[in-house]
Image (cartoon, helix red, strand yellow):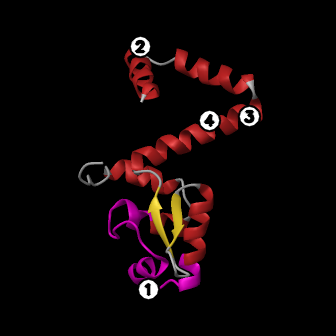
């Protein structure tokens, strides 16, 4: 997987805006590696002592239900460990794909027509940059 690279500050800000306030506080700790993966509720709660254990646990579980975190039980214990399913850039890409799919499901071909219209108005160099991003 390679060595850890801190996330770009602008990308981190954009990713955190896609989450609720508590979710963002937790994911900031995860994505900036203030906490080493995998981590437990107790370890995260030590970083955010103003939050109750149950608040941290509930928020971690919601992030897992949304697919932002992966959760696994610790053998022989009641505790679980959590890891991020994406780095910051991967999360933004995953979120944008999910949101685009939701728009298409909600509005059908009209959403695609609107996307195509907007793409058609972009300068050629921007369209090429977007083509490259889509291939990633």
Q: Nearer the viewer, mark 2 or mark 3?
A: 3
Residue bearing the label numbered 1: 49
Circle 4/circle 3 CB separation < 8 Å: no
Q: Which mark is residue 100?
A: 4
Residue nearest the observer in this picture, 1 or 33: 1
Q: Earlier in the sequence, mark 1 or mark 3?
A: 1
Q: Residue at x 32, y 52 (%)?
A: 7
**Up-down: is 16 above or below 35?**
above
Q: Are the two marked residues, 1 and 3, in contact with CB atoms closer than 8 angstroms?
A: no
Up/down of 33 relative to 75, above or below: above
Lower position in the chain sequence, tag 4 or tag 3 = 4
Nearest to N terminus: mark 2 or mark 1:
1
The CA distance from mark 1 to mark 3 is 41 Å
For disc 4, the neighbor class at 10 Å (few under 14, some 14 to 19, many from 20) is some
Assess whether residue 34 is covered by the magenta stretch. Answer: yes
Tell me which segment is drawn in magenta: 27-56
Mark nearer the viewer, 2 or 1: 1
The image shows residue 101 at horizontal and vertical percentages of 65, 35
Say which element carries label 3. Answer: helix
Q: Residue at x 50, y 55 (%)?
A: 17
Where residue 25 appears, as percent x and y from the top left, is 46, 68
Q: Secondary structure at mark 1?
A: loop
Question: How far apart are labels 2 and 1 at the CA level?
Answer: 50 Å
Q: Residues within 10 Å of mark 3 (few under 14, many from 20)?
A: few
Residue 62 image position (x, y, % from top left): 61, 65
User: Label 2, on which residue?
Assistant: 124
Check the picture and name the quadrant holding the C terminus: top left
Taking depth in this image into account, of 103 and 118 the one nearest to the observer is 103
Helix or strand or loop: what does disc 2 sit on? helix
Is residue 107 left or right of 133 when viewed as pictured? right
């Amino acid at each position: 997987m390679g060595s850890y690279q801190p996330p770009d500050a602008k990308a981190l800000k954009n990713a955190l805006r896609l989450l609720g306030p508590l979710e963002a506080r937790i994911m900031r700790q995860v994505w900036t590696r203030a906490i080493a993966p995998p981590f437990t509720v107790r370890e995260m709660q030590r970083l955010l002592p103003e939050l109750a254990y149950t608040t941290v646990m509930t928020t971690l579980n919601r992030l897992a239900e949304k697919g932002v975190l992966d959760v696994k039980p610790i053998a022989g214990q009641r505790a679980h460990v959590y890891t991020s399913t994406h780095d910051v850039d991967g999360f933004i890409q995953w979120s944008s794909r999910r949101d685009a799919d939701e728009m298409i499901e909600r509005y059908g071909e009209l959403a695609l027509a609107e996307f195509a219209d907007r793409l058609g108005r972009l300068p050629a160099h921007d369209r090429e940059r977007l083509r490259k991003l889509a291939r990633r």
